[in-house]
Amino acid sequence: MSWPSNQPPQTGLSADDIARLNDKFAKSDAALGIEVAADFTPFEQRNDMFTRAFWDDDVRSDDTLGFFKSYRMKFATRRGEGFAQKDFALRNAAWAVSDIISSRGDAEGKREGFQAALDYDTPVARDQVTVDDPGAEAAEIKRLAKLFGADLVGITEVDERWHYSARVDTRDFSSVPNDLPEGISHVIVMGHAMDPDLVDTYPSALAGASTGLEYSHEAAIVIQLSTYIRNLGYEAVASMNDTALVIPYAVKAGLGEYGRNQMVITPEFGPRVRFSKIFTNLPLKPDVPEPLGIKQYCEICTRCAEACPPRALPFGEPEMASHNRSMLGGVKKWSADCEKCFGYWAKLKTDCAICMRVCPFNRRYDGWGDRLFRKLATGPWRKLALAWEERRGLPERLKAKDWWARLRG
C-alpha cells in the first residue's frame, strides 16, 4: 500500500513555537531530566507501529494482520502453555468494553481511544461552576478520579510538544487534523494498575487480559470523569492512547519516571500500569513532580534488555536519535526498536511484555522486602539493590495452567 494522496497536515507548531515551548518548560524539563532538541518536531500518529501495520508494506505481513485478527478469534490458535483457546478467549473478553467504545466511530474513521479522542454524549453545561481555589479543585478531582476507579492521578499543564501532529483516519489511514477545543489548559493523567498475577504469566495470550482489563476500565473512568467536568460547565476531552503521547504527560504529572523498558515506572506498581488522560480548561493547580531516583537505577540495570527475545531494547545510554519512523526523535531517551518488538508480538499473536514482568520494580510492595528494595534502588545505595537483584535472579514466570488452577481454587 502506498502513501495516501493527501499529504500529512502541518502540525501548526513552527520552529519558533517549539523554541517557545522549550523555553516555557525549561525549568520543569530540567528537573525531570527531559532534554528536547531545538529541531524537535511532534510525532505523526500515522507512524505509530500499530497503525503502520495496516498501511506500510515494510512491516505489514500475514503475521501482523493475524495479530489483529486474533482479537476476533479469526486465526488458528497456537499450541502451548498460555496460548490455548481459553487463554485467547479471556484476553479478548477483557478487551470487550474498550472494543465496543473504540468502534463507535468506525464510519467516521475514528477508532476512539486509539486513533481519536473519545466522543462525548454530554454537552458542556450552560452555567459554569465558579472555581475560586484551583488547588482545592485539583484535590477534589483526584478524589473523584479514584472514586471512579483510577489508581493514580496527577495533573499537569498542556504541552503541545507531546501532541500528535496529525491523527489517523482509519478508513484509509491518511492523516487528518488533530484538534482540541480552544482554551484547553490542563491534563488530568490517571494510572490504572494491571493485575499482577496475570502479568506474571507474560508472555502468553492469558497475560494479554491484564492489558485489556485496564483499557476497558480506563475507558469507563475517563468517560465518567469527563462527563462530570462537562456538567460543571467546562470542556473535558476523554483520551486514552489518542491525541497525545501519554508517557511524557504521565512523567510531567509526577506519576513515575521513564525507564529503559520504554515504560513509565511508578513507585506504587512499577511498570505495571496503563495510563489515560483528560484534556480540560477546568482551573486546576498542576502537580510539581520531583525526581524519584528510578531513572538512575535504570541507568545501571539492563535486565529488560537482556530478557527481550527480539533484542529490541537498548543496552546503552539514552540518545536523541530515531532509528525508524515509529520512534520519536529529538528527545534524549532510551528508544526501543519498535519494528523488532511488534514483529515478535505478531508471531505470538498477543502482546509480549516480558520487559514488564522481569523489571525489578514490578513488585507488590505489600511486604517489607519490596519496600526496602525500592528505598535502596531509588537512593545512593542503588548498586546494593542491583546486587540484590542479580543474586535473586529473574522472577519465575507463572504458568498459565497454574493461574487457571488458582482461579478454580
Image: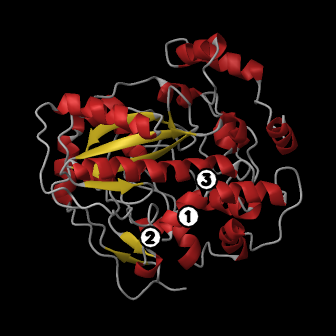
Q: Where is residue 148 in the image (x, y as percent from the top left)?
A: 43, 40
Q: Where is residue 287 in the image (x, y as percent from the top left)?
A: 28, 31
Q: What residue would you read off at disc 2?
A: 46
Position above or below: 128 against 26: below
The residue furthest bottom is: 5
Q: In the image shown, does 98 or 191 lie closer to the viewer? A: 98
**Disc 1 designates what residue?**
99
Q: Where does residue 132 sit, x and y in percent of width and height?
A: 10, 33
Q: Quadrant of residue 367?
A: top right
Instruction: Please name the amino acid that badge 3 sits on.
Output: Gly
Choose top left, top right, bottom left or bottom right for residue 53: bottom right
From this view, report whether residue 298 is shown above or below residue 194: above
Residue at image coords 59%, 79%: 57
Instruction: Check disc 3 and report its element: helix, strand or loop.
Output: helix
Colour mapping: secondary structure
Q: Residue at x 78, y 54 (%)?
A: 87
Q: Earlier in the sequence, mark 1 or mark 2?
A: 2
The percent coordinates of residue 184 (x first, y second) are 20, 53
**Residue holding disc 3:** 212
Q: Which of 249 and 386 is in front in this view?
A: 249
| Viewer-proximal residue among 306 and 110 | 110
Mark 2: give few (<14), some (14-19) or many (20+) Cα within 10 Å.
Answer: many
Vertical relation: 260 (above or below) 371: below
